[in-house]
Amino acid sequence: MSLKTFSRGGVHPPEYKLSAGKTIVELPPPEVAVIPLSQHLGVPAKVLVNRGDQVKVGQMIAQAAGFVSTNIHSSVSGKVLKVDLFMDSSGYRKMAVQIQVEGDQWLETIDRSDDLVRNSVLPAEDIRKKILEAGIVGMGGATFPSHVKLTVPQGKTAEYLIINGVECEPYLTADHSLMMERTEELFSGIQLMMKGLGVEKAIIGIENNKPDAIEKMKQVVQGSSVTVQGLKVKYPQGGEKQLVQALLKREVPSGGLPIDVGVVVFNVGTALAVYDAVMKNRPLIDRVVTVTGKSLEKPSNFIVRIGTPISSLVEKAGGVPDDTAKVINGGPMMGKALPTLDIPIVKGSSGILLINKNEARRREVKPCIRCSKCVTVCPMGLEPYLLMTLSEKALYERMEPEKVMDCIECGSCSYTCPSSRPLLDYIRMGKAEVGKIMRARKAV
Amino acid sequence: MSQIIIYTIITLVAIGAAAAIILYFAAQKFKVYEDPRIDEVEVALPAANCGGCGFPGCRNFAETLVKSDTWDDLFCPVGGNETMSKVAAILGREAIEQAPKVAVVRCNGTPEFRPRVTEYDGAPTCAIAHSLYSGEGGCPHGCLGLADCVVVCDFDAIHMDPVTDLPVVVDDKCTACGACVEACPRDIIELRKKNKKDRKIFVSCINEEKGAVAKKNCSVACIGCAKCFKVCPHEAITMENNKAFIDSEKCKLCRKCVVVCPTNAILELNFPPRKTDKIETDES
């Protein structure tokens, strides 16, 4: 029997999972932590601390400033140096809290033991509340506040919870290592989410290049209503719409969300954060980050505090190799190059990838030869060549009926283009412009 | 044989005549009246179709000029006052005079003043680079040097200087149509009043960051010290968001602000050299 996968488009880049099977190493807190106030999609959080304040690990330092927003907690203990603008991964300066680390004092309410807590007596509403309080966002990279996803809108029902353990980006192994090392906690987190959401069935989707993780998860979920499904390796299977299609053969409508077909999708990292928040009272203050690259001495999986500078992670992995051309925040397909290493790890940082000069080499951009490869690989069924041309010519009003807003920015089109055209760069720009037009129309 | 030819000619002439009659009555019946003055006005306009007036092409602007009751917002920047008075003469109306304008690039971040700390090798347009990161020089407000403004200019009035990596406006060619202002994703280009002999004084920086940060990225950044604001005798300078702005309508070109600026962020162009020797001009 052939393995399940999504039906439309997709590519299979070389996997290069260099850090697979490496044990997660916990890094000590940094000397100075910079914690941005906008680490999630939506409104930036409202800061609660002032310069000179003493904070402890787990203390809330910024509060959700709306429904689509979330709380931010201090990941270190020490003194607040500044609440000011600091450079984030976009190269632009955004509001952040800078903390001088002194010792490692945790809030007393946090359970720091490794004991596994299984059964929760909390009602669904309290679970959702705790998730908001703990500032949990989607850990796969999109950083959408989790409590919003767990609140099923009126008139819709959730039938399935899907846990995304696909990790289809080449190089990254953060989710893989979590599934291997914290399987029990993960399962407990999934059960909490099912309760919070009020669903009976959950499916864990894992790509077939992680047979050990599939095996381990299968053992743990035995006898429960959670199933584990191995999937054929294909990028971008980790996109939630693709994953829903692969597992359930349900198509999320254009402009819709998985909840429109009765599904809610969460990353494995998010499930673990939910476990920590609900069972251990531990807010989201650290995450697993893969630091990898072909020339890197020790590709590793680290568990680091939010706000740690990226430079210290790279240092721990053996330092920046001489032939490094770019450092990428995220995976090679969707990640973005960093302007400097002096940028903090945030809730959505899944990996740091150092690519060497040979890999970073750009081929000459040639004219489109109308081979339609980009159309074939687009997982959303769009026509990337057309969207790029429209964006290039600034014909934004024509991009909307071509469904540019459905683009998930996976980069399969740019990856596959034999003329090395920067399709996604232009489409992304056009998408931003169309978004502006649509918002302006809504405002009128 | 000749009979066939005669029949053919007669038939064709008959069809032609019938069609002509039908078309004549149809044209009478469905006639759309168009003010003949629109054609006259269109001829008077520069026919650049640049969109600088805010209308899609000269024809559309001509229609608006003829139909509109007030001319407050209507002006052809390319033709200027000359064209507008010609149009006014055709329509028997009063032309509204506007001071001629010119595009000014408000960034002086040459590689010398603003060292390039990263290398951009993505799609070569400013709009995309702007959406991706703060740019090679690290300044989030400075010129990206990828020439979106040059591409959109219909008048060949702006080009990139290979040494400074900044766009240069040719004042004589610039029509102030505003295409470059629209194209710049960072709003660096501004339309300013055109002065005699193309003299200009302007703050060549739109950085909104605090002085220390701005200075770190670029040695000629406006640091918002407000020295120029205090020295200006004509109240032409305003301070907002850590930067100074000189209103070209109020500026009397006295050059007092240029002297006091500690970072040389205020430029004076096309002026004769000063009599005193302590100040150097920034034309270099």
Image (spheres, coloured by chain):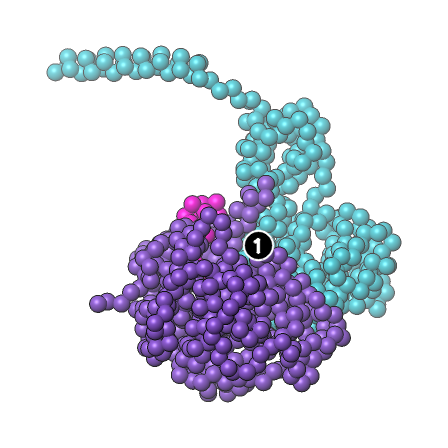
Where does the image place residue B145, in percent across and percent down from the top left? 58, 62
Query: Can you see residue A32?
Result: no
From this view, report whether residue A178 is shown above or below residue B239.
Answer: below
Name the residue nearer the viewer: B242 or A4: A4
Residue range corresponding to the magenta coloring? A396-409
B237 left or right of B156? right
Q: Nearer the viewer, residue A6 or B32?
A: A6
Question: In this structure image, what is the colour of chain A?
Answer: purple
Measured along the vertical axis of the image, is residue B183 above or below residue A197?
above
Query: Position of A95 compared to B120: left or right?
Result: right
> Label 1 is placed on what type of residue?
Cys
User: In which quarter of the view is residue B78 placed?
Assistant: top right
The percent coordinates of residue A98 (x first, y second) are: 68, 74
Q: Nearer the viewer, residue A55 or A302?
A: A55
Could you tell me which residue is drawn at 57 percent across and 74 percent down? A282
* A177 in relation to B48, above or below: below
Closest to the observer, A440 or B13: A440
| Quarter of the image where one finds residue B115 | bottom right
Q: Residue at x 65, y 56 (%)?
A: B188
Q: Chain of mark 1?
A: B
Q: Colour of chain B?
A: cyan
Residue B6 rendering spot, x and y as whole percentages? 19, 13
Find out whether residue A323 is within the magenta segment. no
Quadrant containing the C terminus of chain B is bottom right
Residue that sits furthest to the left in the current view: B1
Q: Which residue is mark 1?
A: B149
Residue depicted at x 66% and y 82%: A105
Locate residue B273, reporting x and y percent.
79, 61
